[in-house]
Amino acid sequence: MKKTIKLIHPKRKYPRMIEAAKSEIRKYIKRSRRQKLPDGQDYWDFDCTFGATEAEANKVHLTEIDKCINETEAAERESFFISIIPRAAKRNS
């Protein structure tokens, strides 16, 4: 998923657009985790980037995405860019 999410809509209020964006991201992650893993891999890991624009995006951990969206909401930005790329990984034991 590579997407610039717009948070301004003529009929929907800003907090509702924030919750819709969070919901869309959660659905994508759940859908990605349901995919069949390749042989020899244990779990799905995600390479995530987040920023105001694609050029300004920085790497973030999957668990920090909600925090980044909340910061975007506090700054009252009109949009943000997010990239979530799933990849199969193996645990180090």
Image: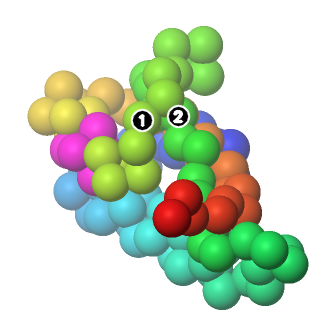
Amino acid bearing label 1: Val
Q: Is residue 47 visible?
A: yes
7 or 59, nearer to the observer: 59
Range of the magenta residues?
66-70
Q: Residue at point 40% right, 43% down?
A: 61
Mark count: 2
Residue under label 1: 60
The question of residue 67 being in magenta is answered with yes
The label number, if any, that marks residue 87 in the structure image: none
For mark 1, give the secondary structure.
strand
Please state the horizontal and vertical placement of residue 41, each as a whole percent of the image: 73, 71
Q: Are marks 1 and 2 in contact (CB under 8 Å)?
A: yes
Q: Kindly state the secondary structure of the residue where label 2 is placed.
A: strand
Name the residue that disc number 2 marks.
Answer: 49
Judging depth in this view, the residue of 32 and 87 nearest the camera is 87
Task: Identify the residue at the far top of this view.
Answer: 55
Placement of 65 over or under 75, stated as above or below = below
